[in-house]
């Protein structure tokens, strides 16, 4: 194992691959590859370096290394698996490889912002992709029903597979929708979104590995905020009073704060420091179009019902 781990690391590093789809280095990717081939759990790998690989395992490992180098496909697609912490998910090219910072926050069930996880009964997840966050939300909030949406039917088929893998079909409802569901479904305690947020300039310069992922799941428009704006303007209609909105936006914090200078974004600390995920309550959201139109109609109605006083004779 030790010999093959070193050889795989050297081969991947020499190929100048991009790492960022579940690993951040050639060493970590080699370890993941060999853990998969040998069926040794990740946490036991460092204690198994003297394990003698079989001929079949050596052949399989060599094939995966060469496929990774030749095709530039993310290793997750070659293995048909991705990990968020200790949780394993099925993935293929119909969905992006899961790598959300929100998963880190769910390990603590969003404490201290949610003090009683059992009180969360209805959760809406937008842009679910593989369904990984929907599964983690259902595991974190055991009394909640989770409605997870995605515009891609192909992605929803992958999500359905992961929901079934965790036995959560009764608590997770997968819905085809362009962000928010169109049917009336009541108000939610929590809305979570990891939408497309890569801006146009960055999209043009992405490494080859990202070309294997669905473009629709990456591109966030010219400035990366197209979907984030829509979420901010519409989320209040779906949240109960004091309900929470949790959104991941990559490296767009400065642009978002400039676009919404009066919105009190709370930036949550993750392994990406405090610039990738924000939290807002329903009351802190900017006015939605529907709420603005409603206020305008009320003003017009009041002005029509208010007659000017008669002039004095």
Image: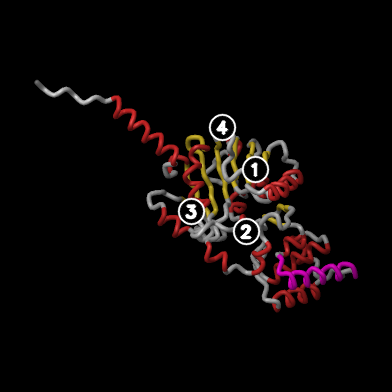
Q: Residue 286, how many percent across, how many down?
A: 42, 44
Residue contact between numbered discs 2 and 1, judged by CB atoms under 8 Å: no
Distance between the Cα atoms at labels 2 and 4? 32 Å
Residue at 59% over, 41% down? 124
| Mark toward the viewer: 4 or 3 | 4
Secondary structure at badge 1 equals strand
Q: Residues within 10 Å of mark 4 (few under 14, many from 20)?
A: few
Q: Residues within 10 Å of mark 1 (few under 14, many from 20)?
A: some
| Magenta residues, start to end | 55-73
The residue at the far right in this view is 55
Camera-nearest residue between 310 and 193: 310
**Principal SS element in the magenta part?**
helix
Counting residues from the start of the chain, the first of labels 4 and 1 encountered is 1
Counting residues from the start of the chain, the first of labels 3 and 2 encountered is 2
Residue at 57% over, 55% down? 196
Please indicate whether residue 291 sits to the left or right of residue 51 in the image: left
Counting residues from the start of the chain, the first of labels 2 and 1 encountered is 1
Q: Which residue is mark 3?
A: 267
72 relative to 82, above or below? below
87 relative to 205, above or below? above
Camera-nearest residue between 154 and 33: 154
Residue 176 - label: 1
Please indicate whether residue 241 sits to the left or right of residue 27 in the image: left
């Amino acid at each position: 194992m030790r010999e093959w781990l070193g050889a795989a690391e050297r081969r991947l590093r020499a190929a100048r691959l991009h790492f960022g789809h579940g690993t951040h280095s050639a060493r970590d990717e080699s370890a993941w590859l060999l853990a998969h081939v040998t069926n040794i759990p990740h946490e036991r790998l460092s204690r198994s370096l003297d394990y003698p690989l079989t001929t079949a395992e050596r052949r399989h490992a060599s094939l995966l290394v060469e496929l990774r180098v030749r095709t530039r496909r993310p290793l997750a697609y070659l293995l048909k698996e991705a990990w968020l912490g200790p949780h394993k998910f099925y993935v293929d090219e119909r969905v992006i490889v899961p790598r959300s910072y929100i998963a880190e926050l769910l390990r603590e069930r969003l404490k201290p912002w949610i003090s009683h996880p059992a009180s969360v009964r209805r959760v809406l997840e937008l842009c679910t992709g593989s369904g990984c966050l929907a599964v983690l939300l259902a595991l974190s909030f055991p009394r909640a029903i989770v409605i997870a949406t995605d515009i891609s039917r192909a992605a929803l088929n992958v999500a359905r597979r992961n929901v079934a893998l965790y036995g959560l079909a009764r608590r997770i409802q997968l819905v085809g929708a362009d962000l928010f569901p169109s049917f009336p479904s009541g108000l939610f305690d929590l809305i979570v979104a990891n939408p497309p947020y890569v801006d146009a300039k960055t999209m043009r310069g992405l490494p080859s590995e990202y070309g294997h992922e669905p473009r629709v799941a990456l591109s966030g428009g010219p400035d990366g905020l197209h979907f984030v704006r829509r979420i901010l303007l519409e989320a209040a209609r779906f949240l109960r009073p004091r309900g929470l909105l949790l959104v991941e936006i990559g490296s767009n914090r400065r642009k978002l704060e400039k676009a919404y200078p009066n919105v009190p974004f709370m930036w949550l600390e993750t392994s990406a420091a405090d610039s990738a995920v924000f939290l807002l309550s329903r009351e802190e959201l900017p006015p939605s179009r529907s709420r603005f139109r409603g206020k305008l109609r009320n003003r017009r109605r009041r002005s029509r019902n208010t007659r000017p006083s008669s002039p004095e004779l």
